[in-house]
Amino acid sequence: MNENDLPDDAHVVRYVKPTSRHEDGSVDGSAFRLRSGDNGLSVNWLECFGDLTRAQQLDAVRKLSRLTMRRRGCLAELGVGTTKQYFPELTALRFVRKPLDAENGYEADPSHSEITGLPQGDSPQAALIGDLIAESIQAIHPAIIDD
């Protein structure tokens, strides 16, 4: 572990697009597969916002997101330590802080992080790991909150 690794008691959320959700609202493992050419899966570290309620942390993620979130999309919450326990053989699996600087009209995002050490592409191993990560989801939050 190095200084950029998130602690095991941290929580992250990943935006899941509507097409990666099942009819019952659960998340398909494809939402956690690394696309070819990517080094990590983008997530947001909730505790980076300090002593806020979970709802306030999620609002901060929504506000700083550079993605277009859809109504049927969601924010899937993972516990860092819990998720890593699913993969004791994947010693390269890490949750790494990668803050984004302000640019192109976007505010800086101190919560941006990545899950690294995942297999690339559409291999059977990548599919299995994506499915296992989906099973480790601790909570599903709406991507868009109606005022």
Image (cartoon, helix red, strand yellow):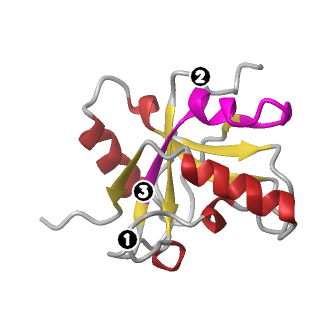
Q: Residue at x 40, y 63 (%)?
A: 74
Q: Earlier in the sequence, mark 3 or mark 1?
A: 1
Where disc 1 sits, the SS reads: loop
Viewer-proximal residue, 29 or 141? 29
Viewer-proximal residue, 112 or 22? 22
Disc nearest the viewer among 2 and 1: 1
* Mark seen at residue 24: 1
Q: Pointers 3 and 2 in contact (CB under 8 A)?
A: no
Q: Give amino acid for label 2.
A: Asp
Where disc 2 sits, the SS reads: loop
Left or right: residue 122 compared with residue 98: right
For the magenta stretch, what is the residue range? 75-94
Q: Residue at x 70, y 27 (%)?
A: 4
Q: Earlier in the sequence, mark 2 or mark 1?
A: 2
Left or right: residue 12 compared with residue 99: left
Q: Is residue 146 above or below residue 113?
A: below
Q: Residue at x 26, y 41 (%)?
A: 56
Work out how far the residue at label 3 is from the one at label 2, CA to CA, in angstroms. Answer: 19 Å
Disc nearest the viewer among 3 and 1: 1
* Mark seen at residue 8: 2
